[in-house]
Amino acid sequence: MSLAGHGALAIWHDIIPEGREDFYAWHGREHMPERLGIPGFLRGRRYVAIDAALEFFNLYEAQSVEVLKGQDYSNRVNNPTPWTLRATTHFRHVARSLCQVKATHGHGHGGLMATLRYDVQPDSLAAHVEAITQQFLPKAASLSGMAGLHLLLADAQASGEVTAEQKARGTANAIPRQVLLVEGWGDEAVFIPMVRDLLSAPALRELQIDDHALLDFYRHQITRCKTAWTAG
């Protein structure tokens, strides 16, 4: 299924063991409802690693990237609740991008998610986007077991703004400049090798993506839709 809006917030991170139980309680009971209470936020999803460098992947869909750069969201990330401050001190190796949804294809939401994080040189970006949107995504979306494919382009300046939540952790976020999301609705044993073949090193080079791209695989844990609940 296509993403719900034209903006997307993509976040990857680890959790240290002693913070895991609190993270699950906070994320489901406070954080996701809070984020989905922000005007323009439409849906939130969390995934956990199957085979990934970072354990969790979180995706928030918004009406536009302007929502993610707007005052309502800024007010939340710069005025964290006490529970948020406690829970996020256990985060490690955070990567976070505020993105424009450049292209989205699909027929449903998959229980499996592959994420490709990468950076394309600015002078190659236009050709890369054309190749992805005009050739790669339509072809890949037709494969058996594909639920959705989505290309996200980060707003690097907005993604790099230091928030109170980040200051509380005391470490900078990585900012993936481009993100390709691949959703599957079948078995891991079929989906993972299919995506690895689809995004093999030769295939990535044809798309002007270098060998430093990070391909990770996740399974779905929770989806939260629009809510009127807010933490403040």
Image (spheres, grey):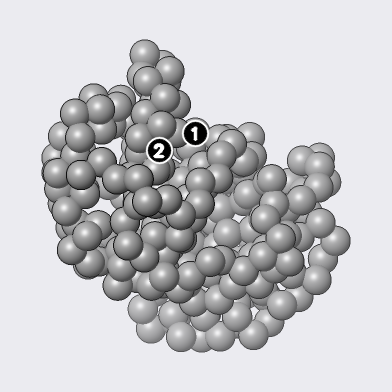
Which residue type carries mark 1?
Glu
Relative depth, front residue between 207 and 192: 192
Place of residue 206 in the rendered image (x, y in percent of width and height, measured from the top left)? 62, 74
Place of residue 69 in the rendered image (x, y in percent of width and height, measured from the top left)? 25, 66
Q: Which of marks 2 and 1 is nearer the N terminus?
A: 2
Residue sitting at 22 percent across and 60 percent down? 72
Place of residue 76 in the rendered image (x, y in percent of width and height, measured from the top left)? 21, 49
Residue 98: assigned label: none
The reply to whether residue 44 is visible in this rendering is yes
Graded by Cα atoms within 10 Å as few (under 14), some (14 to 19) or many (20 or more), the crowding at tag 2 reads: some
Residue 207 is drawn in which quadrant? Answer: bottom right
Q: In this view, does 213 lie to the left or right of 156?
A: right
Question: Which residue bears the numbered disc 1?
Answer: 55
- Residue ranking furthest to the top: 18
Question: Which residue bears the numbered disc 2?
Answer: 13
Place of residue 192 in the rendered image (x, y in percent of width and height, measured from the top left)? 73, 46
Query: In the figure, 10 relative to 94: above or below?
Result: below
